[in-house]
């Protein structure tokens, strides 16, 4: 399975969207599953179900920050911003509430498991840069 499929499966297994994405990169992050699940717990549902920034995006940001972040904050921000923009282009927003609205208006659109997969794929692509 690729990272997209792994993240989707973690979501389907009952993890929140942020957990699903970070768990897909457990090996690369060299952290145990319990630690990653706790670290990402509060980011599900757009931060504790407040439907702010999408948890899958936040998971993506956590992985990219941990694995590719540098002391040059501005360069790191720009790098991560690129991943967020790519996510927004594919999904329509980086805001959970907006994504949910798009999902309700278009039943053929991505579900949350798909969104986790998209975030994981973008993360995988950015890690290769």
Image: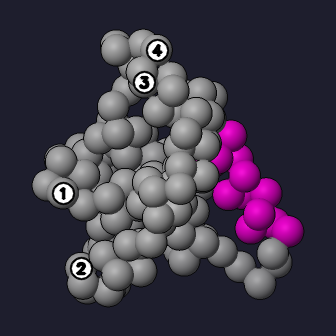
SS at circle 1:
loop
Please give left or right for residue 111 compared with residue 60 in the image: left
Q: Where does label 4 land, which residue?
A: 105
Q: Which residues are magenta?
A: 74-87
Distance in Å between CA atoms under marks 1 and 3: 19 Å
| Residue occupied by mark 3 | 103
Q: Which disc is residue 30 wearing?
A: none
Against 70, residue 115 (above or below) is above
Q: Which is closer to the viewer, label 4 or label 1?
A: 4
- Drawn side of residue 76 relative to residue 53, left or right: right
Return the residue at label 2: 33
Q: Main secondary structure of the magenta part?
A: helix
Q: CA distance from mark 1 to mark 2?
A: 14 Å
The spot of residue 64 in percent (x, y) is 56, 65
Structural crowding at the residue carrying mark 3, measured as other residues with C-alpha within 10 Å and reported as few (<14), some (14–19) or many (≥20): some
The tag on residue 14 is 1
Q: Earlier in the sequence, mark 4 or mark 1?
A: 1
């Amino acid at each position: 399975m690729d990272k997209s499929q792994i993240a989707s499966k973690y979501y389907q297994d009952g993890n929140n969207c942020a957990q699903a994405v970070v768990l897909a990169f457990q090996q690369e992050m060299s952290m145990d599953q319990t630690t990653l699940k706790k670290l990402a717990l509060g980011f599900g549902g757009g931060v504790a179900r407040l439907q702010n920034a999408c948890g899958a995006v936040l998971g993506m940001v956590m992985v990219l920050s941990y694995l590719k972040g540098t002391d040059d904050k501005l360069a790191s921000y720009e790098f991560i911003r690129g991943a967020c923009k790519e996510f927004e282009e594919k999904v329509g927003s980086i805001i959970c509430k907006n994504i949910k609205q798009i999902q309700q208006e278009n039943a053929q659109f991505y579900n949350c498991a798909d969104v986790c997969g998209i975030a994981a794929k973008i993360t995988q692509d950015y890690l290769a840069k």
